[in-house]
């Protein structure tokens, strides 16, 4: 289990501490992460994963993975697989405790029958529209269903026939008999079972009635011996129902699960709900759930974010009771901090401009020593030749005074190499600069007589002959602004969220890199080998640039 989770105190710890002080949950703390397998996990889920697994870890307890698969129409095995992969990748383990709510369909059915026997549930023939109408509003109480007072025997008979497939979808539902006048609309005889003649990806055609989430969830928690059922704030109004069900079925208050709500994570410049993410995938606005622009865990992984940085982010944002919007720059900050420690430095030129070093022999190649990281002893050699590339933006013909990169008659230092001077600017017929002719100072490399000459600018570069072609994909935010709450977020999509640079060059040391390897390209940012990358065609994603707007804002 990772070490950087749940170190900061939060209100959930306080609740658990109180419970333990009161002598509750003597058998240990037990949490669960309960995704619905109807999409890939996103960074909001990462927060929930860190809280649930992290809380269990803090109290030396256990955390289950439970697929909340009570809705057969939207679920898919692809999602079940991806969810497991993502939780593992984040660094957490459920050991042998992976469960499905559908494992409990028999038990849940028995619980429903028990509720009927206790006079606390009834079969209702009202249709969906009528149920909604009878439910009342925030200011008006609801109206009792005409079927509310059916006898226990009749209810048991009808519920059994619902199960046996005698009725069409929607013809009947099972409802909890609570209080149609409750100020909490959730408590106005909520539906707990519905008919759906849809095969389920795990139970096949065995069931044609399915439990509602609000019924299945507390009881699945109870079946698994969960002590603290941590969920997001929108379930706050459902907590009385959660407790009512456990109470009505006779679970002991000192050991039964307790629901605790926290604020969900919202991030700027992106969407977070699976429904919207699916819309992006199905509408081909992105290349898939793991498109590097997606806020999914698989998207971030492919882009080059590390598990440690996502965990760190989840720790930094804290656990609160009120909803807020987190600046995506904070997540990027965490990624940068982590990669700064871990990523080796290499040189790549994204927009090449050819430089000919006229006093360097054409057939000569000099291998120059370069350190991989400021804090490590690792080194490599970078080949220097007569023709090199620098960035187009590192040369300016009519440069302002403060431009310390290359200009006519100006000098710059080439990283790990020599000082060069620009003598001639070659242009095409349209007047574009296509080549520079420079001379180098042979004594200016490390250890040379003129190595300490004062030169303001240092540029990265690669050898024309020895460098490798590479495709680089630059990403910008998916959404132009905070349009997540806009009705039609599709109109707020950033049309420039992907830029493909196909003419880039990189130093040859990376020839054998494998997918997921991360580097800092000097002066350009952090980059990660994409899954599309092949030996013959290297592809890198820009993970994040070097400028840290979050750290800057914090210092202010
Ligand atoms: P979405 O609305 O994105 O589809 P969901 O809540 O329906 O999310 P589930 O698969 O039901 O997704 O969620 C599994 C767990 O993750 C739940 O406990 C849920 O509360 C939590 N969760 C989902 N989104 C967030 C979020 N943005 N921040 C924190 N926790 C979240
Ligand atoms: Mg959901």
Image (cartoon, rainbow, N blue to C red):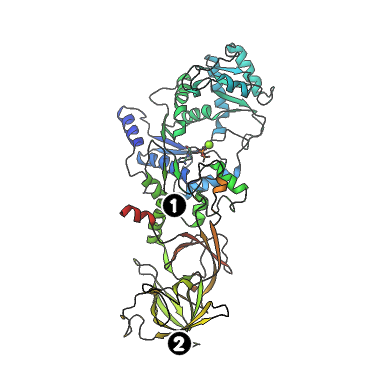
Left or right of 298? Residue 310 is left
Q: Residues within 10 Å of mark 2 (few under 14, many from 20)?
A: some
Give x and y (percent) for residue 487: 55, 40
Give x and y (percent) for residue 365: 47, 83
| Residue pointed to by mark 1 | 307
Mark 1 or 2: the one toward you = 2
- Which labelled disc corresponds to residue 360? 2
Q: SS for tag 1?
A: helix
- Which labelled disc corresponds to residue 125? none
Q: Earlier in the sequence, mark 1 or mark 2?
A: 1
Image-quadrant location for residue 403: bottom left
Front residue of 266 and 109: 266
Q: Residue at x 58, y 45 (%)?
A: 278
Instruction: Report the label total.
Output: 2
Front residue of 350 and 543: 350
127 w.r.t. 98: above or below: above
154 w.r.t. 413: above or below: above
Q: Is residue 55 visible?
A: yes
Front residue of 332 and 435: 435
Q: Say which quadrant the C terminus sits in.
A: bottom left
Give x and y (percent) for residue 299: 52, 52
362 w.r.t. 30: above or below: below
530 w.r.t. 100: above or below: below
Q: Residues within 10 Å of mark 1 (few under 14, many from 20)?
A: many
Q: Is residue 80 visible?
A: no
Give x and y (percent) for residue 407: 42, 78
Tell me how far mark 1 sits from mark 2, CA to CA: 46 Å
């Amino acid at each position: 289990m990772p070490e950087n989770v749940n170190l900061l105190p939060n209100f959930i710890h306080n609740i658990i501490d109180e419970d333990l002080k009161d002598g509750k949950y003597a058998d240990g703390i037990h949490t669960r992460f309960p995704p619905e397998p109807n999409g890939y996990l996103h960074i909001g889920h990462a927060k929930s994963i860190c809280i649930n697994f992290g809380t269990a870890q803090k109290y030396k307890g256990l955390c289950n993975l439970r697929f909340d698969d009570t809705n057969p129409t939207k679920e898919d095995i692809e999602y079940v697989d991806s969810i497991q992969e993502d939780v593992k990748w984040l660094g957490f383990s459920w050991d042998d405790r992976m469960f499905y709510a559908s494992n409990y369909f028999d038990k849940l059915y028995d619980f429903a029958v028990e509720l009927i026997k206790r006079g606390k549930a009834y079969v209702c023939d009202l249709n969906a529209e009528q149920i909604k109408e009878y439910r009342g509003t925030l200011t008006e109480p609801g109206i009792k269903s005409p079927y509310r007072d059916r006898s226990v025997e009749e209810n048991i008979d009808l519920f059994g026939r619902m199960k046996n497939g005698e009725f069409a979808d929607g013809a009947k539902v099972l409802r909890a008999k609570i209080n149609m006048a409750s100020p909490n609309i959730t408590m106005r005889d909520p539906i707990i079972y519905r008919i759906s003649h849809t095969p389920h990806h795990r139970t096949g055609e065995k069931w044609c009635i399915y439990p509602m989430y609000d019924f299945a969830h507390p009881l699945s928690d109870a079946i698994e011996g969960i002590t603290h059922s941590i969920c997001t704030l929108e379930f706050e109004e459902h907590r009385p129902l959660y407790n009512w069900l456990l109470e009505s079925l006779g679970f002991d208050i000192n050991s039964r699960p307790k629901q605790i709500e926290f604020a969900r994570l919202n991030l700027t410049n992106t969407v977070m709900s699976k429904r919207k993410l699916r819309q992006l995938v199905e509408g081909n606005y992105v290349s898939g759930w793991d498109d590097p622009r997606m806020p999914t865990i698989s998207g971030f992984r492919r882009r080059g974010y590390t598990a440690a940085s996502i965990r760190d982010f989840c720790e930094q944002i804290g656990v609160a009771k009120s909803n807020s919007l987190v600046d995506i720059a904070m997540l990027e900050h965490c990624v940068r901090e982590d990669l700064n420690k871990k990523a080796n430095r290499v040189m790549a030129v994204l927009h090449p401009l050819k430089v000919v070093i006229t006093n360097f022999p054409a057939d000569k190649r000099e291998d120059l020593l370069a350190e991989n990281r400021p804090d490590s002893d690792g080194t490599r050699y970078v080949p220097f030749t007569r023709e090199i590339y620098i960035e187009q933006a590192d040369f300016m013909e009519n440069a302002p005074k403060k431009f310390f990169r290359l200009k006519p008659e100006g000098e710059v230092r080439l990283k790990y190499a020599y000082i060069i001077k620009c003598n001639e600017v070659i242009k095409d017929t349209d007047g574009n600069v296509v080549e520079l002719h420079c001379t180098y100072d042979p004594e200016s490399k490390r250890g040379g007589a003129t190595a300490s000459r004062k030169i303001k600018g240092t540029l990265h570069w690669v050898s024309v002959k020895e460098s490798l072609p590479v495709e680089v994909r630059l990403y910008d935010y998916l959404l132009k602004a905070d349009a997540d709450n806009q009705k039609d977020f599709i109109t707020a999509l950033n049309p420039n969220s992907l830029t493909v640079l196909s003419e880039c060059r990189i130093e040859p040391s990376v020839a054998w890199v494998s997918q997921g390897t991360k580097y800092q390209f000097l002066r350009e940012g952090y980059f990660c080998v994409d899954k599309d990358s092949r030996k013959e065609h290297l592809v890198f994603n820009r993970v994040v640039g070097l400028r840290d707007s979050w750290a800057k804002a914090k210092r202010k």
